Structures are given as C-alpha cells and as structure tokens.
Image (cartoon, rainbow, N blue to C red):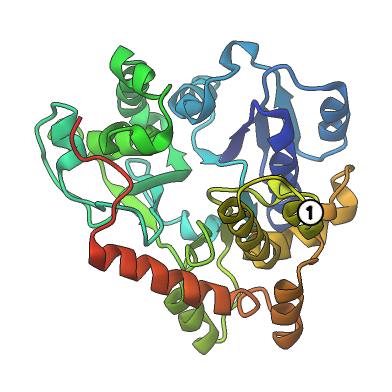
Amino acid sequence: MIVCIYEDRPKYLIGVKLTVLSLARHCPDLPVIISCPQPSASFRRWTELQPNTKLFAEDDLAEVGWNVKPTILLRRLSEGHPEVVWIDSDIIVNRDFRDRLQHFGKDTLVVTQEDYWGQYQGGTHRTVAWGLKPGRTFSTTVNTGIVRVTPRHVELLKTWQTMLNDPTYIQVQRQPYYQRPLHMLGDQEVLTALLGSVEFSQVPVEMLKRGIDIAQCYGPAGYTPSERLQRLLKGQGLPALIHSMGRKPWEMAPSAAAIWSSHEPLKKRLRAYYDRIHLELSPYTSIARQYRQLIGEDARWMDVQTTPARLFATLSAGHPTLQGFPLALFDAAVRHARRRIGIARYRLNG
C-alpha cells in the first residue's frame, strides 16, 4: 500500500505537512508520494527531511484542483503499486487506519460517507442527471477525502476521469459552488453518479463511516453532537481520520481584533468571528498542535485566542471532543431548522 497526496496551492501546503507528519507518527512504514506542481525550494527541502516520503513535481497537473484525483490514482497504479490510497491534504491521521482496510478484497473500492449535513444524500438523482441508467443507490453520498483503489478499478477511474473532463462540467466548475447543479458540484458527486450506474453497479463499495472511522469536520456540527457523544460514552477518543472540510484553520484572520477592526459589514465580521471560534476548537486543530514544532513555519493559527474558545477549552480541560461540543449543539440546531424549513443551497436541476 502507498498513500498519495496532492496540493497545488502554496498556502495549503501546511495541510500536506500535517498529513505527512501524522502518517509518519502512526504509520511509519507506509510510503507517501506527494504530487505538488511547481513546489517551492523550501517545501522541497522540508520533504527531503521526511522519511518514507517522495515529492513529484507533476507540473502538468497545476490548477486542476480535486478533479485531479483519478489522474493521480491512475498514474500511481501504472507505476506498479498494487494498492493506492488517496488522502486529501486537509486530513490528519490520529492513529493507524490500515486495520479498517485490510479485510477488503482487491475488487472493493473504499471511500467515505459524506458528512451528515450533505444535501440530497443518496438516491439516483446524480446518476440520472448525468444521463446514466441507475443500477443501485446508496444511502449517503460518496465523499472522496479517502479513496482506496487497486488495478481492478482502472476502468472505473478512466471513466471518472473522462466525466471530469466533460466540457459542460468544466464550464460549470468556473461558477461559484453554490450556483452549480448538484450532480456537477464536484468530483465526488460525479463518482457517486458513476457508482450508481448500471455499468459499475457490480463494483463492491465500502464507505468508511462518519463519526466512527472519520470525523467530517464541516463546520462545528460536521462532527455531530451525537457522533461525539457515542464515542465518549464508549470511552473512545477521536476517529482515526480527522477531515477539516470547508474553511481551513490556517485561513483564519490573524486575530479576533483584526476581525472587529476590519471594514467588512457587521454580518461578515460576526460570521468570521464565529468561524474563528469553531476552528480554534476543531478536533483537527487540536491534533495539529502536536506537530507545531515540526512544520517549519508560523503556526499562530493554532493558538486559542477568542474569549469563548478559551472558556470552552478551559471548562473541558482542552478535551478535543468536548471543547467544541457547545458550538456543535448550536450549529446542529440551526442546521436542523434549515432542513425543516426547506432551505437548500444547491440546485437539483441542471
């Protein structure tokens, strides 16, 4: 097994570093291949110091974004690797996850469940909207933060790659995400459509379970209150994989004071402050602090600065699951209300 990671945004390479460092700690014998178009000299030097890690400067893949996944997976398979695991660069490893994969056969494609709040989960809409004949349906949408493939999946990957290069899809990707139709929102919607089609309905699919195998931290309640409680009641810690979906902690304003002193409308400042509290208390940020001295760059974004975050952290003794629990409860209540009212962000029609 090898792991492949991709990132073409210089400001997001800190996420790659955290993924690599966490893999080195919990899976020290697992080879890692990083694909980074036009890497900086400093990032090259950093990767050279990491054991079991190779950096490929695949410049032809610059500015492709997450649509690059099937291409990179196909390249790694063509190099002779019998089992390849894609890991998003905003995922941090909390313990060895390979025991969850070792029982699957070579025919099984492994992905993860989408976060609980994903809209219009499962069903056949994505498949039908792509003009494919439905052959099965899933209860949740596929999330491609983790994708495990073998040579048995080459045809599936090639078809996925072709669909991501469809001119209509490429045109839609130039629109803001909230204006895109659901079936073309991104690469994982396309893979969900494909796996639900007759052509690939015989491919065994195993989804790593949200809240159990992976914490899908999309907003405060992405890792839901019920998921947190279930693990706490069982005396379990965080899942093996922590996924910082959406806004990243290193994207925060440099301080709370910078938020309030900006000239943005009050609504935007309140939102930025709310996001900062969430990101300061995120399980991802909590685990990332373990690697602060190893990333080789400024990490002030790891500090807990806001008064509410400090209060929650103090009351929970810095527990990575509990400290964000009050905010997760509030966020979940708001999201449930939106669902009941029928407020949706994405279009079902093309």
Q: Position of residue 101 (x, y in %)?
A: 46, 54
Q: Compare residues 342 and 161 and report the one nearer the observer.
A: 342
Q: Position of residue 192 (x, y in %)?
A: 28, 40
Residue drawn at 43 percent across, 21 percent down = 174
Residue drawn at 43 percent across, 26 percent down = 70
Q: Compare residues 26 and 240 and report the one nearer the observer.
A: 240
Residue 274 vertical placement versus 261 (above, below): below
Residue 137 vertical placement versus 63 (above, below): below
Say which quarter of the image contains residue 318.
bottom right
Q: Is residue 55 left or right of residue 350?
A: right
The reply to whether residue 95 is in sight is: no
Residue drawn at 71 percent across, 50 percent down = 252
Task: From the image, tell me which residue sits under label 1.
Answer: 301
Q: Position of residue 19 (x, y in %)?
A: 68, 47
Q: Compare residues 39 and 331 and report the one nearer the observer.
A: 331
Q: Quadrant of the C terminus?
A: top left
Q: How many marks?
A: 1
The reply to whether residue 130 is in sight is: yes
Residue drawn at 73 percent across, 53 percent down = 259
Q: Compare residues 307 and 167 and report the one nearer the observer.
A: 307
Q: Amino acid at mark 1?
A: Trp
Number of residues whose C-alpha sits closer than 10 Å to that of mark 1, classed few (under 14), some (14–19) or many (20 or more): some
Q: Position of residue 108 (x, y in %)?
A: 34, 45
